[in-house]
Structure formats: structure tokens, C-alpha cells
Amino acid sequence: MQLRLWLDIFQKLRASGFNAVSIYFFWAYHSPNPDTYDFETGAHDIQRFVDKSQEQWGATRLTRMSYRLFDYAKQAGIWIIIRSGPYINAETTAGGIALWCTAGGCGVPRTHDEAYHQAWLPFVTKVGQVFARNSVVEGGMAILNQHENEFIESYHDPNWTGVKYMVQIGGAFKNVGAVVPSTHNEKGMRSQSWSKDYLDVGGSVDIYGLDSYPNGFNCANPTGGFTTVKYATFTWSLEIGSEDRLTLGVVRIIRGFKHIPRLSHRIFRNTKEVHSILGEDIRMITVQP
């Protein structure tokens, strides 16, 4: 996308009633080779800082100018949910993994394989530094940081390679000061993945991500039509201060026709509370901005 369009799109979203967007940051896009990590040129410019020394009245004045995506978001009043993988599934070619890694020299993807770890670590470190200085606690617009993407916790075992991998990702962001709450998107609610409310054996995120499709459409059976459902809406929120509350999103609970409690617009503190009240009546859940 051309740089000059970003602010216009953010402003249109804000005018339409949206207050947040989720944005992917592709490892492959920013790293065309192992020695290059480009966050400054053209549309790669998520935010760069240019120091300009100017001679004025016999003294050198240093001015700092900031540019691009995060600054446009702040100008438009749009919060940002960060999604930098390092693997992001079918959203782009090869799951967003740097194409120089696809020849097999980077170990086993999505595991704690040290070759893979050392391959993605420079990208997460560099992009994480940008996230850190743009976090909401620093006056920026980044409110959530998604670790990986649709990655099912197949085994609740601290020795499983997937758990160790998620621990590596969390540690990498923490080491560069990216302290906004972490999240993940549970693939189709097919498991109990990376939630501190379930079996937390490592790698769990701060806010469990609910990820499914509300209309019941089945890609494997496109002629099957849509499922008629009823729903109620709930709000997840984040305490910013003693009085301020930042709404992170509306969670739509899709359920069947029986045992539908009157809980519209109830605020839940965590995932465990949702399940304790709704129990098995939950069918599908999706997050709406």
C-alpha cells in the first residue's frame, strides 16, 4: 500500500466508528536477506526516526522527526493490535517466514529449534523495539501484541517444542521492552491454547484470543448455506488507570436456541468466568472491533 493512503484509511475507519485495527508485520517483507531488516524505506516505513542537525543562530539544533504507520494511527485516533508472527499462516506467502529461510537452512519452523530461533530473533528484536516505543504505556497506540498465529497448543507439556517456542517469542519481546499485553488467536476454538485460565505450562499469553466465524459457513461444503444462530455480546476491557477503562473489543458469543441467559453487555474479567457462566452453551466465538 502506498504510504500516502495509510492516514486516509485510518481516518475513514475512525469516521465509521472503529477505534482499533489489527496489523500484520511480515518477517519476509522486512527481511529480503539475512543481513537486511528494512523498516525505513518506502512502505516498509512503519516508523523511522531521522535526526537532522541544523545550524541556527550560531548553534546546532537537533530536531527529531517521526514518520509513518504508528504516527498516522495516533493522528487518526486508532489503536493498533500488533501481529508479527513470526509465522502468520495463509495471510501471506510461506506464512510470512523470510523467503531466504524456505530453502531449509533455518531449522524446523514453529518449534524451539535453535536454528529457527536464531533466524527469527533479529526480526522480532528489531520490530519489537518499534512496538515498545509505541506502546500505550509510553503514550503510543499499540494496545495488544499477538504472539504467533492460529498455533494450537497440542500438548500441555512444558517439554513440548511448541511450548518452548512460545516461551522464546514472549521472552524476545520482553527483552526489548515490548510490555503491552500479549494475546493469541485460538484457531476455531478447537483446543485450550496459551491461556493462563487453563493449563498454563509456559508460553501462555495475557489475554486469550477467541477466533472463530459466527455464521457457521463451512469452506469444505460451500453449498451448505449458513447456520442460523442467536447471540449475545460481551465486552473485554483493560484497566489503564484507577478510573480509565479501555475497551479492547466486543466478543460475540454464538450459541444455540436453548438456555440463553440474559447477559447482554456483561463485562467479564477473564475467559474462565465466561465458561463458568455459559458452560457448554458456547458454540462459536469471534472478536469484533
Image (cartoon, rainbow, N blue to C red):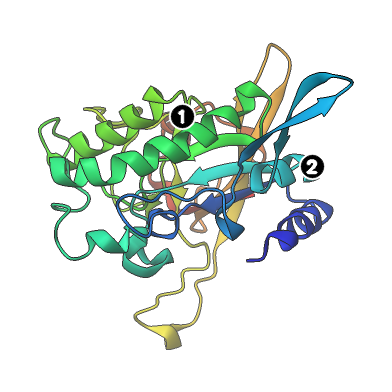
Indicate which disc, 1 or 2, sits on the residue closer to the N terminus. 2
Query: Circle 2 — which element?
Result: helix
Residue 254 visible, this orientation: yes
Question: Picture coordinates of residue 95 (x, y %)?
Answer: 34, 62
Rendered image: mark on residue 5: none
Q: Amino acid type of disc 1?
A: Glu
Q: Nearer the viewer, mark 1 or mark 2?
A: 2
Residue position marked by numbered label 2 in the rendering: 75
CA–CA distance in space, label 1 to label 2:
36 Å
Residue 275 higher or lower than 187, as above or below: above
Q: Amino acid type of disc 2?
A: Gln
Residue drawn at 50 percent across, 72 percent down: 227
Instruction: Name the residue at the left extreme.
Output: 159
Question: Picture coordinates of residue 186 (x, y %)?
Answer: 37, 48
Mark 1 touching mark 2, by CB under 8 A? no
Neighbours of disc 1 within 10 Å: few (<14), some (14-19), many (20+): few
Frontmost residue, 199 versus 264 = 199
Question: Picture coordinates of residue 43 (x, y %)?
Answer: 59, 59
Instruction: Name the residue at the front extreme.
Output: 58
Q: Is residue 44 left or right of residue 193?
A: right
Q: Quadrant of the N terminus?
A: bottom right
Instruction: Name the residue at the top extreme.
Output: 242
Residue 39 higher or lower than 159, as above or below: below
Q: Is residue 221 left or right of residue 66?
A: left
Rendered image: mark on residue 273: 1
